[in-house]
Image (cartoon, rainbow, N blue to C red):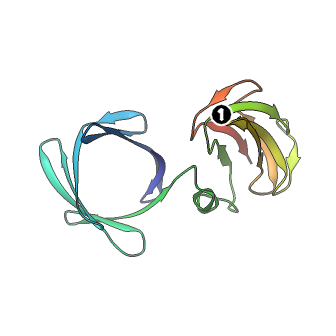
């Protein structure tokens, strides 16, 4: 599972992979050795670098680790709701990422072109179906990170709307 984690205003890429009875965790691409046990629906016990931490999910998207509380927002790049929460209408550059693994069939908007919210910008083929990805907001296409024929995985950067 891949997530974008906004912790105290800073974005991190979080990847969690089930390995047998445990998990492998990568934060910003770096392997982190943790042992994780779910105590209840809102409490996790994490063993990290020989220290035990109890992580409690609170209200208002807060997480408490020991005596410290952090504002956190997790977004799943595969989720429509999460993609909208991650910046569907804000200012500044917005990254459009792959919501499914597949192959880029066509790039519909070139770099430097003005696009409107809902306008098709890219077509990805997944499971023998073509899916048109649309601009989440008005803006100008900045960097295009993929081209026709490229295979993409969930969470891969496709293009940036500025």
Q: Position of residue 89 (x, y in %)?
A: 70, 62
- When the figure is inspected, residue 137 is found, relative to residue 20, above or below; the finding is below
Front residue of this view, candidates 143 and 120: 120
Q: Where is residue 74 in the image (x, y as percent from the top left)?
A: 46, 57
Q: Identify the residue at the far front of this view.
A: 128
Whether residue 96 sits left or right of residue 7 in the image: it is: right
Whether residue 117 sits left or right of residue 95 in the image: it is: right
Q: Identify the residue at the far top of this view.
A: 149
Q: Which residue is drawn at 77% across and 57% down?
A: 137
- When the figure is inspected, residue 95 is found, relative to residue 70, above or below; the finding is above
Front residue of this view, candidates 9 and 14: 14
Q: Residue at x 63, y 58 (%)?
A: 80
Whether residue 62 sits left or right of residue 89 in the image: it is: left
Asked where in the image residue 98 lies, by quadrant, the reply is top right
Q: Residue at x 77, y 26 (%)?
A: 148
Whether residue 93 sits left or right of residue 16 in the image: it is: right
Asked where in the image residue 18 lies, by quadrant, the reply is top left
Determine crowd level at label 1: few under 14, some 14-19, many 20+ residues with C-alpha closer than 10 A.
Answer: many
Residue tagged by mark 1? 102
Asked where in the image residue 81 lies, by quadrant, the reply is bottom right
Where the N terminus falls, by quadrant?
top left
Q: Residue at x 68, y 60 (%)?
A: 88
Q: Where is residue 48 in the image (x, y as percent from the top left)?
A: 19, 45
Label 1, secondary structure: give it: strand
């Amino acid at each position: 599972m891949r997530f974008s984690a906004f912790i105290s205003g800073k974005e991190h890429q979080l990847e969690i992979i089930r390995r047998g009875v445990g998990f492998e965790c990568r934060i910003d691409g770096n392997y982190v050795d943790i042992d994780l046990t779910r105590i209840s629906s809102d409490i996790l016990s994490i063993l990290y670098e020989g220290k035990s931490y109890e992580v409690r999910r609170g209200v208002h998207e807060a997480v408490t680790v020991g005596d410290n509380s952090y504002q956190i927002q997790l977004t799943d790049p595969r989720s429509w709701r999460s993609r909208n929460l991650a910046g569907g209408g804000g200012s500044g550059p917005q990254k459009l990422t792959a919501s499914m693994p597949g192959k880029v069939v066509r790039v519909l908007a070139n770099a430097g072109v003005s696009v409107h919210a809902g306008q098709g910008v890219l077509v990805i083929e997944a499971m023998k179906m073509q899916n048109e990805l649309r601009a989440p907001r008005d803006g100008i296409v900045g960097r295009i990170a993929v081209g026709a024929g490229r295979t993409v995985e969930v969470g891969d950067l496709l293009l940036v709307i500025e």
